[in-house]
Image (cartoon, helix red, strand yellow):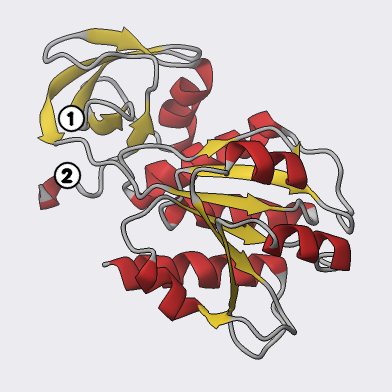
Amino acid sequence: MKKYKRLVRLYIPDADFVCGEKFGISEGQAHYLRNVMRKSAGESLRVFNGRDGEWLATIAELNKKSALLELTHKLLEQKQSSDIWVLASPVKKEAFDMMIQKSCELGAAKFIPVTCAHTVVHRINQERLQAIAIEAAEQSERFDVMIVEPLMDLKKVLKSVCCERNVIFCIERVEVASFSETVKKLAGKPLAILIGPEGGFSSQEIDFIQGLEYVNAVTLGSRILKSETALIAALSGVQLLEN
């Protein structure tokens, strides 16, 4: 397997992988192979679709706007990421792009952007953010891709979408349980990590969130962290403590 590690890796969600089958890829992916990676017909790459593991494929045809791949054989069986969701308020473009990228790299299964009282960014480009998640999955050796959901109201998400999973509520300046103890207690259970906006949560939001029985308020330490830093710290902590 080591000899294949340096090969280009592409996510092909619409193809069902069967040995010997041929299928086309998107114009953007064809452009990437031909003009960015300087590949040509006959060369190999790795492909995955989020269902059938990782496969070795050969470039059968490669033109300016299209390409045809042929599946050679399966390299690795399918592996699913941990059942962890991220609930986070949109922040400035560069920082939020990084939050999407790092959430995918660190194994989150779903990212739900949420609006809070102090949210300053009220529009997102879901398609562009999903593309960032796909690129992160390709580069980080994931076998699936984190789903980026549309922007939703925080209270609506907590009362409906997340009511059947344990929510880790990262909060500052409040005496709450330690992060490590809480994660260890919830090991193996479906989780959602809640990160606030740049201005933090309002007092009304804090009261509402802490009043939900499936919410676990935790501290990430004594320092006041930026939203993107808090998210990376929380996801890294979950990954370390669950393994």
Residue 98 in the image, given as x and y percentages of width and height:
62, 57
The reply, left or right, for residue 194 in relation to residue 30 is right
- Determine whether the residue tagged by mark 1 lies in a helix, strand or loop: strand
Disc number placed over residue 86 in the picture, else none: none
Residue 185 in the image, given as x and y percentages of width and height:
37, 70
Q: Amino acid at mark 1?
A: Leu
Residue 92 appears in view: yes
- Corner quadrant of residue 198: bottom right
Q: Amino acid at mark 2?
A: Tyr
Contact flag, marks 1 and 2 (Cβ < 8 Å): yes
The residue that mark 2 highlights is: 4
- Determine whether the residue tagged by mark 2 lies in a helix, strand or loop: helix
Q: Residue at x 80, y 56 (%)?
A: 92
Q: How many marks on residues?
A: 2
Residue 148 in the image, given as x and y percentages of width and height:
59, 37
Q: Residue furthest bottom?
A: 222
- Corner quadrant of residue 48: top left
Q: Residues within 10 Å of mark 1 (few under 14, many from 20)?
A: many
The front one of 184 and 12 is 184
Distance, label 1 to label 2, CA atoms, is: 8 Å
Q: Reading the chain from its start, which is encountered first: label 1 or label 2?
A: 2
- Corner quadrant of residue 61: top left
The residue that mark 1 highlights is: 56
Q: Residue at x 78, y 64 (%)?
A: 207
Q: Residues within 10 Å of mark 2 (few under 14, many from 20)?
A: few
Q: Quarter of the image for the C terminus: give it.
A: bottom left
Residue 135 in the image, given as x and y percentages of width and height:
48, 41
Q: Residue at x 21, y 25 (%)?
A: 57
Q: Residue at x 41, y 29 (%)?
A: 33
Residue 197 appears in view: no
Tell me: residue 84, above or below residue 226: above
Tell me: residue 96, above or below residue 138: below
